[in-house]
Amino acid sequence: MDNFCRRFHGGDSGAPKVVPYTFDDVVRTLNDVAPYDWVTLLKERVNLTSTHAPLGGIEKGGWKLVYNDKPNSFVSALEKKGKFALLTDSIGVSIGKEGELEDVIHGSPAFAAGLGPGMTVIAVNGRKYSIDILREAIKSAHDTHRTIELIAEASQSYKTYSIIYYDGEKIPHLERVEGQPDILGNILTPKTGAN
């Protein structure tokens, strides 16, 4: 990465200027640093979509993506700052402090129940909505296998939505893979001085 950046972005020091480049320029510089089929890789990663994020780099870097109900400090800080709950990997919503559905993931349990962005959740299992109450309901559904009942408002109409979901809260984490070198950690190590 460092070698590519030096070669691709290198040049005379001075005032910023616009220097156009092409796809072929990127591929040529990548091949100068490390010969590979960069055309295929870049076209797959830039032009195509997939149902899952490309995790090969993380996994080959000595880590794996796991989900559990343990707090993630980055996600928690993001939620606290934005005053919302990121429940996209469990029931499939990003929901604000006042119950506003900021996003509903297509195909998620919340989407299947009929919820959509722009609605406002008023109550959870008969209790006034709060982020903590919703999180308790997700945990309770895991323990009891009962649906999560939400009352939501949309365009001044109220309706009850039943979310069928019993897997508890799923929070993403990176975990080290035993016996593999920590390549990702080395990449993320801060650089000091001029290299």
Image (tube, rainbow, N blue to C red):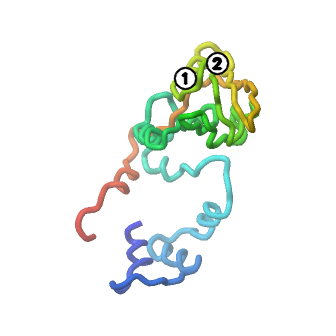
Residue 125: mark: 2
> Percent from the top left, x then y, of residue 35?
50, 71
Q: Secondary structure at mark 2?
A: loop
- Residue at 69% x, 36% y: name it: 108
Q: How many residues crowd around disc 1 within 10 Å: few (fewer than 14), some, or many (20 or more)? A: some
Q: Is residue 104 above or below residue 70?
A: below
Q: Amino acid at mark 2?
A: Asn
Q: CA distance from mark 2 to mark 1?
A: 9 Å
Q: In screen coordinates, is 118 left or right of 22? A: right
- Residue at 62% x, 13% y: name it: 144
Of residues 178 and 162, which is closer to you in this image? 162
Q: Amino acid at mark 1?
A: Ile
* The image quarter in which residue 156 lies: top right
> Percent from the top left, x then y, of residue 77?
41, 40
Check disc 1 and report the residue beneath it. 133
Q: In screen coordinates, is 124 left or right of 26? A: right
Q: In screen coordinates, is 178 left or right of 192? A: right
Q: Secondary structure at mark 1?
A: helix
C-beta proximity under 8 Å, tags 2 and 1: yes
Of residues 153 and 85, which is closer to you in this image? 153
> Percent from the top left, x then y, of residue 138?
59, 23
Of residues 115 and 12, which is closer to you in this image? 115
- Residue at 50% x, 74% y: name it: 31
Q: How many residues crowd around disc 2 within 10 Å: few (fewer than 14), some, or many (20 or more)? A: some
Residue 74: mark: none
